[in-house]
Amino acid sequence: DAKTTQPNSMESNEEEPVHLPCNHSTISGTDYIHWYRQLPSQGPEYVIHGLTSNVNNRMASLAIAEDRKSSTLILHRATLRDAAVYYCILRDFYGGSQGNLIFGKGTKLSVKP
Amino acid sequence: DTGVSQNPRHKITKRGQNVTFRCDPISEHNRLYWYRQTLGQGPEFLTYFQNEAQLEKSRLLSDRFSAERPKGSFSTLEIQRTEQGDSAMYLCASSLRGEFLSVHGYGYTFGSGTRLTVV
Protein backbone atom coordinates (compact mmCIF):
# COMPACT_ATOMS: atom_id res chain seq x y z
CA ASP A 1 0.00 0.00 0.00
CA ALA A 2 1.20 3.50 -0.82
CA LYS A 3 2.43 5.77 1.93
CA THR A 4 0.72 8.86 3.32
CA THR A 5 2.13 11.93 5.08
CA GLN A 6 0.18 13.79 7.76
CA PRO A 7 1.08 16.52 10.25
CA ASN A 8 1.81 15.12 13.70
CA SER A 9 -0.66 17.40 15.43
CA MET A 10 -3.21 20.15 14.88
CA GLU A 11 -5.29 22.37 17.11
CA SER A 12 -8.78 23.71 16.59
CA ASN A 13 -11.32 25.75 18.46
CA GLU A 14 -14.67 24.28 19.30
CA GLU A 15 -17.41 24.90 16.73
CA GLU A 16 -14.93 25.96 14.06
CA PRO A 17 -14.19 23.98 10.90
CA VAL A 18 -11.10 21.78 10.82
CA HIS A 19 -9.15 20.80 7.71
CA LEU A 20 -6.88 17.80 8.19
CA PRO A 21 -4.45 17.38 5.28
CA CYS A 22 -2.96 14.21 3.88
CA ASN A 23 -0.33 13.88 1.14
CA HIS A 24 -0.12 10.70 -0.92
CA SER A 25 2.00 11.55 -3.93
CA THR A 26 2.59 7.90 -4.90
CA ILE A 27 -1.08 6.95 -4.97
CA SER A 28 -2.05 4.47 -7.70
CA GLY A 29 -5.18 4.48 -9.80
CA THR A 30 -6.84 1.72 -7.76
CA ASP A 31 -6.03 3.11 -4.32
CA TYR A 32 -8.95 4.25 -2.24
CA ILE A 33 -8.38 6.99 0.35
CA HIS A 34 -9.69 6.00 3.76
CA TRP A 35 -9.89 7.99 6.98
CA TYR A 36 -10.21 6.48 10.42
CA ARG A 37 -10.04 8.16 13.78
CA GLN A 38 -9.15 6.88 17.22
CA LEU A 39 -10.66 8.46 20.29
CA PRO A 40 -8.74 8.13 23.57
CA SER A 41 -8.86 4.60 25.02
CA GLN A 42 -10.84 3.24 22.06
CA GLY A 43 -10.15 1.33 18.89
CA PRO A 44 -10.10 3.20 15.58
CA GLU A 45 -13.40 3.94 13.87
CA TYR A 46 -14.22 4.44 10.22
CA VAL A 47 -14.84 8.05 9.19
CA ILE A 48 -15.05 8.26 5.40
CA HIS A 49 -13.49 7.00 2.18
CA GLY A 50 -13.30 8.04 -1.46
CA LEU A 51 -11.66 7.38 -4.80
CA THR A 52 -11.81 10.49 -6.98
CA SER A 53 -14.84 12.58 -6.17
CA ASN A 54 -15.43 14.57 -3.01
CA VAL A 55 -17.52 12.68 -0.46
CA ASN A 56 -19.82 13.74 2.35
CA ASN A 57 -21.35 11.79 5.19
CA ARG A 58 -22.79 12.58 8.58
CA MET A 59 -19.37 12.65 10.21
CA ALA A 60 -17.22 14.58 7.77
CA SER A 61 -16.38 15.56 4.20
CA LEU A 62 -13.48 14.34 2.12
CA ALA A 63 -12.00 16.66 -0.48
CA ILE A 64 -9.73 14.93 -2.99
CA ALA A 65 -7.33 16.88 -5.18
CA GLU A 66 -7.81 16.59 -8.91
CA ASP A 67 -4.47 14.76 -9.30
CA ARG A 68 -5.33 12.63 -6.24
CA LYS A 69 -1.93 13.30 -4.69
CA SER A 70 -3.48 14.89 -1.65
CA SER A 71 -6.75 14.95 0.24
CA THR A 72 -8.32 16.84 3.11
CA LEU A 73 -10.67 15.61 5.78
CA ILE A 74 -13.07 18.36 6.78
CA LEU A 75 -14.91 18.47 10.07
CA HIS A 76 -17.45 21.24 9.60
CA ARG A 77 -17.88 22.16 13.26
CA ALA A 78 -15.40 20.65 15.66
CA THR A 79 -16.66 19.53 19.02
CA LEU A 80 -14.70 18.41 22.05
CA ARG A 81 -15.67 14.84 21.16
CA ASP A 82 -13.76 15.15 17.88
CA ALA A 83 -10.43 15.27 19.74
CA ALA A 84 -8.72 12.15 18.43
CA VAL A 85 -5.92 10.80 16.25
CA TYR A 86 -6.95 10.87 12.60
CA TYR A 87 -5.41 8.38 10.20
CA CYS A 88 -5.30 8.74 6.42
CA ILE A 89 -4.81 5.33 4.76
CA LEU A 90 -4.52 4.19 1.15
CA ARG A 91 -5.77 0.75 0.20
CA ASP A 92 -5.67 -1.00 -3.14
CA PHE A 93 -9.17 -2.17 -3.87
CA TYR A 94 -8.11 -5.11 -5.98
CA GLY A 95 -5.21 -6.81 -4.34
CA GLY A 96 -2.24 -6.44 -2.11
CA SER A 97 -2.96 -7.81 1.30
CA GLN A 98 -6.67 -8.18 0.66
CA GLY A 99 -7.37 -4.95 2.37
CA ASN A 100 -5.28 -4.89 5.49
CA LEU A 101 -5.37 -1.37 6.85
CA ILE A 102 -1.82 -0.10 7.29
CA PHE A 103 -1.80 2.74 9.81
CA GLY A 104 0.79 5.50 10.08
CA LYS A 105 1.11 7.76 13.12
CA GLY A 106 -1.79 9.97 12.10
CA THR A 107 -2.62 13.53 13.16
CA LYS A 108 -3.51 14.20 16.77
CA LEU A 109 -6.30 16.76 16.78
CA SER A 110 -6.83 18.84 19.90
CA VAL A 111 -10.04 20.85 20.26
CA LYS A 112 -10.08 23.84 22.59
CA PRO A 113 -13.31 25.03 24.21
CA ASP B 1 -25.29 -7.16 17.83
CA THR B 2 -23.28 -4.79 19.99
CA GLY B 3 -20.14 -4.53 17.91
CA VAL B 4 -16.75 -6.16 18.35
CA SER B 5 -16.14 -7.40 21.86
CA GLN B 6 -12.70 -8.06 23.34
CA ASN B 7 -11.87 -9.75 26.61
CA PRO B 8 -10.27 -9.10 28.95
CA ARG B 9 -9.96 -5.32 28.76
CA HIS B 10 -6.78 -5.37 30.81
CA LYS B 11 -4.24 -8.08 31.56
CA ILE B 12 -1.18 -7.88 33.77
CA THR B 13 1.14 -10.85 33.61
CA LYS B 14 4.61 -11.80 34.70
CA ARG B 15 7.33 -12.22 32.13
CA GLY B 16 7.44 -15.79 30.86
CA GLN B 17 3.76 -16.52 31.40
CA ASN B 18 1.31 -17.35 28.63
CA VAL B 19 -1.71 -15.16 27.94
CA THR B 20 -4.77 -15.57 25.74
CA PHE B 21 -7.11 -12.88 24.47
CA ARG B 22 -10.54 -13.36 22.95
CA CYS B 23 -12.33 -11.42 20.25
CA ASP B 24 -16.00 -11.76 19.33
CA PRO B 25 -16.62 -10.07 15.97
CA ILE B 26 -19.84 -8.74 14.51
CA SER B 27 -21.74 -11.88 13.64
CA GLU B 28 -22.29 -11.16 9.94
CA HIS B 29 -18.63 -10.22 9.35
CA ASN B 30 -16.53 -12.95 7.76
CA ARG B 31 -13.16 -11.23 8.16
CA LEU B 32 -11.36 -10.77 11.45
CA TYR B 33 -8.11 -8.90 12.07
CA TRP B 34 -5.64 -8.58 14.92
CA TYR B 35 -3.53 -5.46 15.44
CA ARG B 36 -1.06 -4.36 18.09
CA GLN B 37 -0.61 -0.75 19.19
CA THR B 38 2.11 0.72 21.36
CA LEU B 39 2.04 4.18 22.91
CA GLY B 40 2.23 7.00 20.39
CA GLN B 41 2.11 4.69 17.37
CA GLY B 42 -0.64 3.69 15.00
CA PRO B 43 -1.97 0.13 15.10
CA GLU B 44 0.30 -2.47 13.48
CA PHE B 45 -1.23 -5.33 11.52
CA LEU B 46 -0.59 -8.81 12.94
CA THR B 47 -2.84 -11.26 11.13
CA TYR B 48 -6.25 -11.75 9.57
CA PHE B 49 -8.80 -14.50 8.99
CA GLN B 50 -11.45 -15.01 6.38
CA ASN B 51 -13.95 -17.28 8.03
CA GLU B 52 -11.79 -19.90 9.77
CA ALA B 53 -8.80 -19.61 7.44
CA GLN B 54 -5.81 -17.57 8.54
CA LEU B 55 -4.83 -15.88 5.29
CA GLU B 56 -1.97 -13.63 6.24
CA LYS B 57 0.48 -13.17 9.09
CA SER B 58 2.77 -10.20 9.58
CA ARG B 59 6.44 -10.80 10.27
CA LEU B 60 5.68 -9.06 13.58
CA LEU B 61 3.91 -12.26 14.57
CA SER B 62 6.77 -14.24 16.07
CA ASP B 63 6.65 -17.96 16.83
CA ARG B 64 5.44 -17.13 20.32
CA PHE B 65 2.21 -15.73 18.91
CA SER B 66 -0.62 -17.89 17.63
CA ALA B 67 -4.11 -16.99 16.54
CA GLU B 68 -7.09 -19.17 15.86
CA ARG B 69 -10.63 -18.70 14.67
CA PRO B 70 -12.41 -22.03 15.04
CA LYS B 71 -15.66 -22.30 13.08
CA GLY B 72 -15.17 -18.81 11.73
CA SER B 73 -16.73 -17.13 14.72
CA PHE B 74 -14.74 -15.81 17.70
CA SER B 75 -10.95 -15.67 17.63
CA THR B 76 -8.21 -16.10 20.19
CA LEU B 77 -4.72 -14.65 20.24
CA GLU B 78 -2.22 -16.44 22.44
CA ILE B 79 1.20 -15.17 23.42
CA GLN B 80 3.56 -17.73 24.91
CA ARG B 81 6.49 -16.90 27.17
CA THR B 82 5.59 -13.22 27.32
CA GLU B 83 8.33 -10.60 27.21
CA GLN B 84 8.24 -7.00 28.37
CA GLY B 85 8.29 -5.91 24.73
CA ASP B 86 4.91 -7.56 24.27
CA SER B 87 3.30 -4.88 26.45
CA ALA B 88 0.83 -3.13 24.16
CA MET B 89 -2.82 -2.71 23.28
CA TYR B 90 -4.09 -5.64 21.21
CA LEU B 91 -6.92 -4.64 18.92
CA CYS B 92 -9.35 -6.84 17.06
CA ALA B 93 -11.45 -5.73 14.10
CA SER B 94 -13.96 -7.35 11.79
CA SER B 95 -15.38 -6.56 8.38
CA LEU B 96 -17.28 -8.02 5.50
CA ARG B 97 -15.23 -9.27 2.58
CA GLY B 98 -15.03 -6.29 0.25
CA GLU B 99 -16.32 -4.10 3.07
CA PHE B 100 -19.74 -3.71 1.60
CA LEU B 101 -22.10 -1.60 3.60
CA SER B 102 -23.75 -3.55 6.37
CA VAL B 103 -26.16 -2.47 9.03
CA HIS B 104 -23.08 -1.72 11.09
CA GLY B 105 -21.74 0.72 8.54
CA TYR B 106 -18.78 0.61 6.24
CA GLY B 107 -15.23 -0.52 6.74
CA TYR B 108 -13.59 -2.18 9.68
CA THR B 109 -15.23 -2.20 13.10
CA PHE B 110 -12.70 -2.27 15.90
CA GLY B 111 -13.10 -3.43 19.45
CA SER B 112 -11.84 -1.40 22.39
CA GLY B 113 -8.80 -3.61 22.73
CA THR B 114 -7.03 -5.61 25.42
CA ARG B 115 -4.23 -3.78 27.19
CA LEU B 116 -1.41 -6.14 28.10
CA THR B 117 1.22 -5.22 30.66
CA VAL B 118 4.13 -7.61 31.15
CA VAL B 119 6.01 -7.05 34.39
Image (spheres, coloured by chain):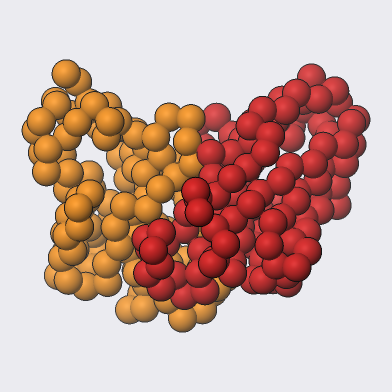
- The image quadrant of residue B48 is bottom right
Picture coordinates of residue B114, whole percent (x, y): 64, 36
Q: Colour of chain A?
A: orange
In the picture as drawn, the residue positioned furthest to the front comes out as: B1
Residue pictured at 89% horizontal, 31% vertical: B17
B47 vs B82, left or right, is left
Q: Is residue B45 visible?
A: no
Where residue A32 appears, as percent x and y from the top left, is 34, 69
Q: What residue sits 86% from the left and 26% below the top?
A: B15
Quadrant of the image occupied by residue A91: bottom left
Residue at point 41%, 73% (across, down): B100
Q: Is residue A84 above or below residue A25?
A: above
For residue A17, side relative to residue B93 (left or right)? left
Q: Is residue A56 left or right of residue B33?
A: left
Q: Is residue A14 visible?
A: yes
Q: Which is more toward the observer, A25 or A12?
A: A12
Colour red maps to chain? B
Image spot of residue B44 (x, y percent): 58, 48
B11 or A2: nearer the viewer:
B11
Query: Which residue lies at the image location 61% right of the left edge and 61% below the top edge?
Result: B32
In the displayed structure, does residue B13 sit left or right of residue A21? Answer: right
In the picture as drawn, the residue positioned furthest to the left comes out as A16
Task: Tell me where residue B68 appears, x and y as whole percent.
Answer: 78, 59
Front position in the image: B104 or B20: B104
Residue B28 falls in image quadrant = bottom right
Instruction: Judge whether B73 appears above or below A9 on screen.
Output: below
Number of on-image labels: 0
Locate the C terminus of chain B and report the quarter of the image it occupies. top right
